[in-house]
Amino acid sequence: MRVRTADIKKFRRTVRSHYRAHGRDFLPWRKTKNPYHIAVSEIMLQQTQVERVLNYYQKFLRRFPTVRALARAHLPDLLRVWQGLGYNRRAIFLQKIARRVVQEYGGVLPSDPEILATFLGIGKNTAGAVAAFAFNIPTPFVETNIRRAFIHFFFPRRKKVSDKQFLPLAAKTLDRRNPREWYYALMDYGAHLGRRAKENSNRRSAHYRRQSRFEGSDRQVRAGIVRIILAEKRLTVRDISKNLGEKPARIQRIAASLAREGFIKKTKNQFTIFS
């Protein structure tokens, strides 16, 4: 796709103008350059709204203030702090990241986005975000608000826009002297577009997927199983089934999945959280 230099300049002016007037500099993870703290925020923000993360970010860091504190944490303690944030496997990913950082990098998160992308739970886009926000490294990456901003501005009438189509634009528009602030501005502009009643550019993305309902889903049951085992320490399938009002067969299937992922373990006929 050919884009005029004038359009790139206009895009940059639009994004920066919005940021000067409405930038969300109050977000606590924007007030630090600590790589561990920023990695925590980026994992929390995966598939989760900013407003919800605000309720957990500082509480989490008070309990696990350093990468070493998280690496040596007991899983039940970690999951209790995470409870209510959703997608509990991210908590396990964070701890595995912390343990690898301690074991392989002396407790210092690497700055190279290619290395960061090899960590379980990070991937290419989160690696780019951590590199930009923690180390001010100019790396093109994609997330929901960035995608919305590019589709809205450069593809106003096109459907099924793939990330590959606008990644060259992301590279061309990137402020290589201050990528940290540029991405703050770009995300805030995309978030602003998302709040507009008639604007939902992400629906025209080739990667758009409507999130499935939480109510009654396996995700809800998974969260319920973890929650009540944390509270009760040890429970049988029958106990969990009665507590959640679900059939034992469904509880058995989902509990087995949680056990395979390292959340819970079975001792005789009871389930408990890994310590």
Image: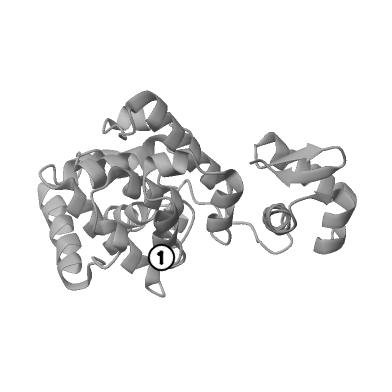
The quadrant where residue 113 appears: top left
Does dot 1 land on a helix, a strand or a loop? helix
For residue 237, side relative to residue 1 (left or right)? right
Q: Residue furthest bottom?
A: 197
User: In the rendered image, is residue 1 in sight?
Assistant: no
The residue shown at (39%, 61%) is 58
The residue wearing badge 1 is 54
Q: Position of residue 240 (x, y in %)?
A: 82, 55
Q: Position of residue 181 (x, y in %)?
A: 18, 54
The residue shown at (23%, 59%) is 31
Q: What coloring was used for the rendering?
A: one colour
What amino acid is labelled 1 in the image?
Leu
Q: Would you place residue 8 above or below residue 268 in this image?
A: below
User: In the rendered image, is residue 236 in sight?
Assistant: yes
Looking at the rendered image, the quarter that the C terminus falls into is: top right
Q: Residue furthest top?
A: 104
Looking at the rendered image, the quarter that the N terminus falls into is: top left
For residue 262, side relative to residue 191 (left or right)? right
Residue toward you, 133 or 58: 58
The residue shown at (75%, 57%) is 232
The quadrant where residue 118 appears: top left
Residue toward you, 224 or 23: 224
Number of other residues with Cα within 10 Å of mark 1, as a class: few under 14, some 14 to 19, many 20 or more: some
Q: Position of residue 143 (x, y in %)?
A: 38, 49
Q: Position of residue 201 (x, y in %)?
A: 40, 60
For residue 263, side relative to residue 118 (left or right)? right
Residue toward you, 154 or 52: 52
The residue shown at (49%, 35%) is 96
